[in-house]
Structure formats: structure tokens, C-alpha cells
């Protein structure tokens, strides 16, 4: 193996902005910041999410960011700061690097992800139970 996940994470962390959970708490509610939840929908259903976060499963990120993609989402065309998170910060670090490479100007990720957000006392929205 030429490059493992630890190498990829180290490369990402060297070039992206990483925001501690406490700083993310202060940014929550800022109209200029979009929280982007990269977790699988099953994780969101089980664990909840940061209130108001935009859900973008990691596997769709590149397709939703690229304005030329048939799957492009207008949210990524907005001149805002995008704050990515996943469960622990690994997927979000890799996603932030990719988004930056794709041309999103203001991208960061939450160190420690949703887990750190909860530990810092961040609000959590639980989805409605399906009947």
C-alpha cells in the first residue's frame, strides 16, 4: 500500500482549516456559516444532528459541489463558510480538502466531529421517529 488513511488524513490536516468544537458552537446560528453533516443518513437517524445542518452524505459531496454536475446543490454555490463534520473528524477532514481543491473558498471542519460537538455541550436535533 502506497498511502494509508493516516497519510491521507495528515495531508488533509496540513492544508485545511480545523475548528475546535467550542469555536463551532460560537459559529452556530451565524447566517454566513453552513454546517454540513457528512454522515450516512442512518447515523443521523440514530445519533441526531446539529440543528440546521445541511445533510450531504460523504459519497455525494463531489457531485453536489460541482455546478456542472446534474446533482449540483445550490447551497454550495452560496458565498458562505462551509463547516463540515462527521462522527469523529476523519471523513470531514478528507471532505474539506476535496471541497477546497474543487474551489470552495471558505471550508473548514470540526475537530473531533459530532462527538466533540456533543461533548462541548452543542445542541442536537433528533429526527422524528418513523412509525
Image (cartoon, helix red, strand yellow):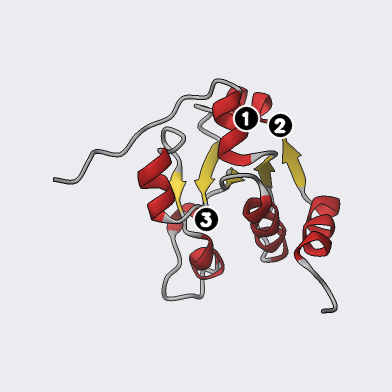
Residue 85, located in which quarter of the rendered image?
A: top right
Residue 11 rendering spot, x and y as whole percentages = 84, 59
Q: Which of marks 3 and 1 is nearer the N terminus?
A: 1
Query: Relative to the observer, which residue lies in front, 75 or 20?
Result: 20
Label 1: few (<14), some or many (≥20) within 10 Å? many
Cα gap from disc 2 to disc 3, whole angstroms: 23 Å
Instruction: Tell me the mark number nearer the camera, choosing from 3 and 1.
Output: 1
Left or right relative to 102: residue 54? left
Residue 24 bears which disc, if any? 1
Residue displayed at 41% across by 36% down? 52
Q: Earlier in the sequence, mark 2 or mark 3?
A: 2
User: Which secondary structure, mark 3?
Assistant: helix
User: Which secondary structure, mark 1?
Assistant: helix
Cα gap from disc 2 to disc 1, whole angstroms: 6 Å
Label 2: few (<14), some or many (≥20) within 10 Å? some
Residue 20 bears which disc, if any? 2
Question: Which quarter shows the N terminus?
Answer: bottom right
Q: Are marks 2 and 3 in contact (CB under 8 Å)?
A: no
Read off the residue under disc 3. Answer: 76
Cα gap from disc 3 to disc 1, whole angstroms: 19 Å
Q: In this view, does 26 lie above or below 12?
A: above
Label 3: few (<14), some or many (≥20) within 10 Å? some
Residue 93 rendering spot, x and y as whole percentages = 70, 52
Query: Relative to the observer, which residue lies in front, 101 or 21?
Result: 21
Q: Is residue 94 above or below residue 1?
A: above
Left or right relative to 104: residue 47? left
Q: Are marks 2 and 1 in contact (CB under 8 Å)?
A: yes
Residue 5, located in which quarter of the rendered image?
A: bottom right
Q: Is residue 34 above or below residue 65?
A: above
Left or right relative to 94: residue 71? left
Residue 91 rendering spot, x and y as whole percentages = 63, 55
Residue displayed at 45% across by 67% down? 72
Amino acid at each position: 500500500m502506497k498511502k494509508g488513511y493516516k497519510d491521507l488524513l495528515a495531508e488533509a490536516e496540513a492544508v485545511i482549516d480545523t475548528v475546535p468544537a467550542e469555536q463551532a458552537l460560537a459559529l452556530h446560528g451565524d447566517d454566513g456559516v453552513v454546517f454540513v453533516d457528512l454522515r450516512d443518513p442512518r447515523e443521523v437517524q440514530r445519533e441526531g444532528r446539529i440543528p440546521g445542518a445541511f445533510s450531504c452524505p460523504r459519497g455525494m459531496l463531489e457531485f453536489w459541489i460541482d455546478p456542472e454536475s446534474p446533482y449540483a446543490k445550490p447551497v454550495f454555490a452560496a458565498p458562505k463558510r462551509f463547516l463540515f463534520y462527521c462522527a469523529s473528524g476523519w471523513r470531514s477532514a478528507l471532505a474539506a480538502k476535496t471541497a477546497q481543491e474543487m474551489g470552495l473558498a471558505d471550508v473548514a471542519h470540526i475537530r473531533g466531529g459530532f462527538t466533540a460537538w456533543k461533548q462541548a455541550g452543542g445542541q442536537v436535533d433528533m429526527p422524528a421517529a418513523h412509525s
